[in-house]
Image: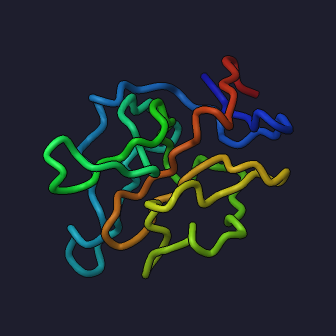
Amino acid sequence: MTIFACVRCATVLTNDLDEVQFAALPDPVSPSDLQPGETCPAWVPSGKFAVDVDPFGPPYVPSETERYVVSAGPRNTVLIGPEDLLVRRLHADYGRRNGCCGLDGVDGPNLVCDCGAEVATESSDCWTAQVVRLQPDAVVRIRGGA
């Protein structure tokens, strides 16, 4: 079991979690993929976490073909289900809190620790998978949990 804590102040940020391989996660589902009245599942099951080795979030750079942009953000973000995050304070910068039905998560970390450190990016909008990504440089992994 593993918990994640804030690097700056050591506040415990997550429930006790078991690691699963990123490749073992189901395909992400967004609320817009479902029929009216259906509940959207979190991308990562409760009590689990996975590490995404691919870049996520800003900055965005031109692709090799320069026909679109791709993420050049941090690698190794830690994906957890929203219900496993214990500290959830919205970022003071409203530009980080875009979305129509929730947070879209495309403008950088939108959640902060109680100490003010940018610790996570929540995606919870109607067109996004329901997930929280912990910033790899803002959290520390503690084996054994609580």
Q: Is residue 72 left or right of residue 102?
A: left
Residue drawn at the location 51% of the way across and 36% of the way down: 78
The residue nearer to you, when weighing 37 against 109, is 109
Q: Is residue 59 above or below residue 2?
A: below
Q: Is residue 120 above or below residue 106?
A: above
Residue 31 in the image, given as x and y percentages of width and height: 30, 69
Residue drawn at the location 29% of the way across and 48% of the way down: 70
Residue 114 in the image, given as x and y percentages of width and height: 82, 54
Q: Is residue 52 left or right of residue 127?
A: right
Q: Residue furthest top?
A: 143
Residue 11 in the image, given as x and y percentages of width and height: 82, 40
Q: Quadrant of the C terminus?
A: top right
Q: Is residue 140 left or right of residue 131?
A: right
Residue drawn at the location 29% of the way across and 63% of the way down: 30
Q: How many marks?
A: 0
The residue nearer to you, when weighing 124 against 91, is 91
The residue nearer to you, when weighing 59 against 50, is 59
Q: Is residue 78 left or right of residue 38?
A: right
